[in-house]
Image (cartoon, rainbow, N blue to C red):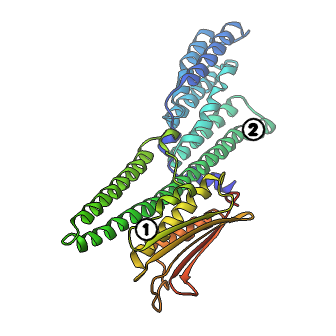
């Protein structure tokens, strides 16, 4: 409960103060009707026209309970205090209508949507009005205790609901942060792969441009295709960031798309091997396998010295999917001692799905990246 009270002292976020809606007008209409009926039908009511008109004028204040909780509470309890003063000065019977209990909603709204300073000021004002009313009504000890507990019930409910709303807001913020991190990984994996391929092709083009013009033209066409794919995927990510609908999310590449990474007309050559039942994998696992293989291939193309071949092997063994990406390049002492952002992101992606990833020099030379993911999805 302490956390609930602590959340009151933080300024509410703008989303907590929603605009007036149809339900708000319906609530006002219900209380207006109740006040009118009670003002007409209640027997022995002193100052009937004045009290009824005052109650009818008070009800629209409920529309301010979210946008201006302190002002609404002060107006509502100010009317109650004015009736107490009038009753005390005229020595009349109780002047209040039962429908004017709507001011308790304003007390709830003050704690639920007001800032810390507004709550302090409003609560002090409410306490003064309540004490005045109890004095005018000559309330006994039982009435004082019971009435105080009744008011505190509304305050406690407001504090609890405010705390729950704050927890929900923090959860939403955490989800958005996770989405940003995921998009950062996707951006790194996609752009790094395509740009690396463009760089390799450009280097090859520089070698053959003078001796093999036809081959150079083919390389330029390959560079153009890679650049187009990069732009297409970048536009897709930007569309996801700017659109709210689920239809903005295009299907991500998966295991079935790994074959497109294979190539034999460039160095290093890329071989792709798929074994086992790799269909109907959960979407998260399917996409992760592709991204991990793509990133491992990008690292091999960029960093493997004198590599002539990169092998991508994916197979399902029981309840897990195993990915192995190995190259035959030269390694040197200390390579991989300090993993960069790429390897860190790959390891995080595997861990989020309940799997693990390892990377290091192979037993027969080269560099090997291995990942094991649960075939049934995150665990």
Q: Which mark is residue 144?
A: 2
Give me the residue at 43% from left, 63% from top: 188
| Label 1: which secondary element | loop
| Residue at figure coordinates x 71%, y 28% from the top left | 137
| Residue 41, horizontal then vertical, whole percent | 71, 7
Q: In the picture provided, is 223 more to the left or to the right than 296?
A: left
Instruction: Specify few, some or many for label 1: CA neighbours under 10 Å numbering under 14, 14-19, or 20 or more.
Output: few
In front: mark 1 or mark 2? Answer: 1
Q: Position of residue 150 (x, y in %)?
A: 74, 37
Q: Quadrant of residue 82?
A: top right
Q: Who's the residue at 61% across and 22% down the image?
A: 27
Outermost residue on the left side: it is 210
The correct choice, above or below, for 8 with respect to 369 in the image is: above
- Please give the name of the residue rendered at 38% of the width and 70% of the height, measured from the top-left corner: 266
311 w.r.t. 163: above or below: below
Q: Is residue 183 above or below residue 360?
A: above
Residue position for label 1: 264
> Residue 36: percent from the left, percent from the top?
63, 11
- In the displayed structure image, the side of residue 277 where residue 293 appears, left or right: left
Farthest residue to the top: give it.
40
């Amino acid at each position: 409960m302490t956390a609930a009270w602590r959340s009151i002292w933080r300024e509410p976020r703008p989303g907590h103060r929603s605009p007036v809606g149809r339900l708000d007008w319906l609530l006002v209409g219900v209380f207006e009707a109740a006040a009118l009926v009670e003002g007409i039908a209640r027997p022995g009511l002193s100052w009937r026209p004045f009290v009824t008109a005052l109650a009818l004028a008070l009800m629209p204040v409920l529309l301010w309970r979210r946008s201006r909780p302190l002002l609404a509470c002060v107006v509502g309890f100010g009317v109650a205090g004015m009736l107490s003063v009038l009753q005390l000065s005229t020595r009349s019977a109780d002047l209040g209508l039962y429908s004017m209990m709507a001011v308790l909603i304003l007390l709830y709204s003050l704690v639920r949507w007001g800032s810390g300073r507004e709550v302090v000021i409003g609560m002090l004002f409410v306490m003064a009005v309540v004490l005045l009313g109890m004095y005018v009504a000559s309330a006994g000890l039982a009435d004082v205790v019971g009435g105080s507990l009744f008011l505190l019930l509304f305050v406690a409910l407001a504090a609890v609901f405010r705390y729950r709303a704050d927890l929900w807001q923090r959860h939403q913020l955490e989800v958005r942060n996770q989405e940003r991190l995921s998009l950062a990984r996707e951006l790194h994996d996609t752009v790094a792969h395509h740009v690396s391929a463009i760089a390799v092709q450009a280097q090859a083009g520089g070698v053959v441009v003078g001796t093999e013009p036809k081959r150079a033209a083919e390389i330029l066409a390959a560079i153009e295709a890679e650049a187009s794919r990069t732009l297409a995927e970048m536009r897709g990510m930007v569309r996801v960031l700017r659109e709210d609908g689920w239809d903005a999310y295009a299907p991500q590449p998966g295991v079935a798309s790994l074959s497109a990474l294979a190539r034999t007309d460039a160095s290093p050559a890329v071989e792709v091997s798929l074994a086992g039942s790799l269909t109907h994998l959960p979407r998260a696992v399917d996409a992760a396998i592709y991204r991990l293989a793509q990133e491992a291939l990008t690292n091999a193309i960029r960093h493997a010295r004198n590599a002539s071949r990169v092998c991508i092997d994916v197979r399902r063994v029981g309840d897990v999917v195993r990915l192995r990406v190995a190259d035959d390049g030269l390694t040197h002492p200390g390579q991989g001692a300090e993993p960069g952002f790429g390897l860190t992101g790959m390891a995080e992606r595997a861990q989020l799905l309940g799997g693990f990833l390892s990377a290091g020099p192979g037993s027969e030379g080269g560099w090997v990246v291995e990942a094991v993911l649960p075939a049934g999805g995150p665990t």
